[in-house]
């Protein structure tokens, strides 16, 4: 057991202290223009602070991976002039930069948390949780804590017929995390989310653990991403702490690209990818379109010196 603890701490000791930003797409299809807007903001914020820019492929859930899409995504990012210092195709000192190649690292983090008593096995099916949570339709399902306090014997018994997922034991206190653009975001994880899954019963590591472990070990100081992920910062905040990192990174949750109806773009409502957009427009048109959507003067995205002003305007 002691070895497990040491293994994560060994990884942690390799963590660089540096100015560093990142973009972390999932290779589950084509990037839409909204993804590109977030990527360019992450890139410019990083360059403005003189940071190292990391590219990371978030392919932890192999079932969602679309063959060929990682190459397509990297090609699109190059087309809009994004250059990464570390990442797929070029490597770097804090890789691998592809999540599917980092399972050993996630497992060491999990064992570390397990040893601290912060994880427990959960044998519930989705249906059982839904029934036990008794929540109103359409509301987030909060894990009701069914398996939180099972005895070792009970765990053993249930383990005979089902393999468990592993959940993080959340504190029953208000967690407040500061975002540079959106201000403070707070949540009581116990009542708002419940104990959340870090490893699924099918062995897949969750987004939350993979992203936090990677951001820690790659020395990411500034996380710029879409504001739809704002609600995950209290969960990530508690994981950063539990994994014993000295400080939280800076979070910048940026506005999403909206369509004419004011809805955010997603792969589902099928916004055009870059190739289709460029059939009728130029890259300059695209950046103007982003500026218009963000409500900042045209050309703002090209002038790095005014980037602080740009982010000021986004506030
Ligand atoms: Zn359970």
Image (cartoon, grey):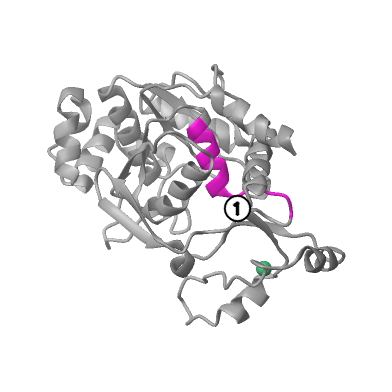
Residue at the spot x=55%, y=35% of the render? Answer: 57
SS for callout 1: loop
Q: Residue furthest right?
A: 160
Quarter occupied by the N terminus: top right
Toward the viewer: 169 or 260?
Answer: 169
Residue at the spot x=36%, y=28% of the render? Answer: 80
Is residue 27 at all visible to an observer of this figure? no
Question: How far from the left and from the top, in percent, is residue 244?
Answer: 51, 38
Toward the viewer: 146 or 211?
Answer: 146
Toward the viewer: 183 or 268?
Answer: 183
Q: Which residue is mark 1?
A: 118
Considering only vertical position in the picture, is 242 above or below 176?
Answer: above
Residue at the spot x=56%, y=78% of the render? Answer: 133
Considering only vertical position in the picture, is 304 above or below 245?
Answer: above
The residue segment tinted magenta is: 202-216
Specify whether residue 279 is painted magenta. no
Question: How far from the left and from the top, in percent, is residue 199?
Answer: 66, 51
Toward the viewer: 26 or 268?
Answer: 26
* Residue 60 falls left or right of residue 220: right
Q: Quadrant of ligand 1?
A: bottom right
Question: How far from the left and from the top, in percent, is residue 174?
Answer: 37, 61
* Residue 77 falls left or right of residue 306: right
Query: Are there few (<14), some (14-19), or many (20+) residues within 10 Å of tag 1?
Result: some
Specify whether residue 215 is painted magenta. yes
* Residue 121 falls left or right of residue 224: right
Is residue 189 at all visible to an observer of this figure? yes
Q: Is the distance from the Cβ of mark 1 to the nearest ligand 1 atom less than 8 Å?
A: no
Residue at the spot x=47%, y=21% of the render? Answer: 16
Considering only vertical position in the picture, is 139 above or below 196?
Answer: below
Question: How far from the left and from the top, in percent, is residue 291?
Answer: 20, 40
Task: Characterize the magenta stretch by its predominant secondary structure.
Answer: helix
């Amino acid at each position: 057991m002691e070895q497990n603890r040491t293994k994560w701490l060994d990884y942690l000791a390799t963590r660089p202290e540096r100015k560093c930003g990142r973009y972390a797409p999932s290779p589950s299809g084509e990037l839409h223009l909204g993804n590109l807007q977030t990527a360019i903001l992450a890139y410019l914020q990083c360059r403005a602070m003189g940071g190292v820019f990391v590219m990371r492929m978030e392919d932890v859930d192999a079932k969602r991976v679309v063959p060929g899409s990682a190459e397509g995504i990297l090609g699109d990012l190059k087309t809009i002039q994004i250059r990464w210092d570390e990442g797929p195709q070029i490597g770097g000192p804090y890789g691998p930069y592809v999540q599917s190649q980092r399972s050993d690292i996630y497992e060491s983090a999990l064992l570390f948390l397990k040893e601290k008593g912060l994880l427990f096995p959960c044998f519930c099916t989705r249906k059982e949780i839904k029934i036990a949570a008794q929540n109103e339709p359409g509301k987030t399902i909060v894990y009701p804590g069914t398996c939180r306090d099972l005895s070792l014997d009970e765990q053993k018994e249930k383990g005979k017929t089902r393999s468990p997922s592993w959940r993080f034991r959340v504190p029953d206190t208000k967690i407040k995390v500061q975002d540079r653009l959106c201000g403070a975001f707070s949540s009581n994880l116990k009542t708002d989310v419940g104990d959340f899954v870090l490893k699924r019963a099918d062995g897949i590591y969750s987004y939350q653990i993979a992203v936090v472990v990677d951001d820690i070990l790659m020395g990411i100081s500034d996380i710029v991403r879409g504001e739809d992920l704002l609600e995950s910062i209290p969960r990530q905040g508690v994981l950063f702490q539990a994994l014993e990192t000295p400080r939280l990174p800076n979070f910048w949750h940026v506005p999403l690209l909206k369509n004419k109806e004011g809805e955010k773009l997603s792969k589902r409502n099928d916004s055009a990818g870059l190739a289709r957009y460029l059939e009728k427009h130029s890259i300059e048109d695209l950046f103007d379109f982003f500026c218009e959507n963000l409500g900042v003067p045209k050309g703002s995205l090209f002038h790095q010196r005014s980037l602080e002003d740009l982010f000021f305007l986004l506030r």
